[in-house]
Amino acid sequence: MSRPAGLFAVIVAMVLSVAALRAEEKTVPVGETMHAAIIADTLGNAEERDRNLAKILLAGIRVGPKTVVGVYSRVARLMKASLPPGTIKDFDFKQLDVVLDDARKGVKRTDTNLKYFVGVFLKNRGDVEKARYYLTRSAQTAQYRWPNQALACRLLREMKAPFVPLGDEKPQADAPAKP
């Protein structure tokens, strides 16, 4: 291969790499990104948490509010509102329940995961009572195949929280709700 042809091949490879990175930016894996944000939050790394929440918010701009990315983006927005200069009092729990209901009714149910993420986020802010509530809701799910359900159970054990049924709420079946 001649020197110009070799250089051309390197440039093409670089362009393809940049294109792949840009395509990756357009399809943010919101579950993994939310995990990264929550882990960073737990470790006290606000910059990394905020960067990951911003990725989720940006991804949510391009999709409908009831899609998987859309419900993650709505939860990320609620979380961001309660971060400095705001406070946990700025977290809109009524809106969260609307988002969780949309997530439960979605084609790919994500409410179990979102309840876990919210529970950890609230625990990190010192609101142990509400954290326990959302972690328990995640742990009670019939969607036992979701890893976050197991993580919620483990965190509840670490918190020495009693596993108490939530009144009339029954675990939801795995099948999505019919429109």
Image (spheres, rainbow, N blue to C red):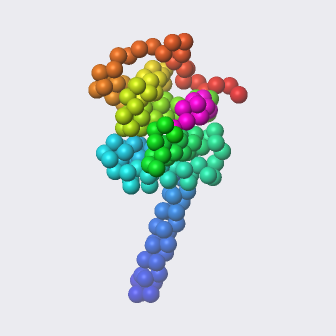
Q: Which residues are magenta?
A: 91-103
Q: Position of 151 compared to 17: left or right?
A: left
Magenta stretch containing residue 54, yes or no? no
Residue 124, by quadrant, is top left
In the rendered image, the quadrant that contains the N terminus is bottom left
**Does residue 150 show up?**
no
Magenta span: predominant SS is: helix
Which residue appears at 35% of the width and 16% of the height? 162
Q: Nearer the viewer, residue 85 or 125?
A: 85
The correct choice, above or below, for 2 with respect to 21 in the image is: below
Q: Is residue 111 above or below residue 45?
A: above
Q: Residue at x 41, y 14 (%)?
A: 164
Q: Residue at x 44, y 87 (%)?
A: 4
Residue positioned 47% across, 81% down in the render: 8
Horizontal and vertical percent for residue 108? 57, 34
Task: Give yes or no for residue 92 being in the magenta stretch.
Answer: yes
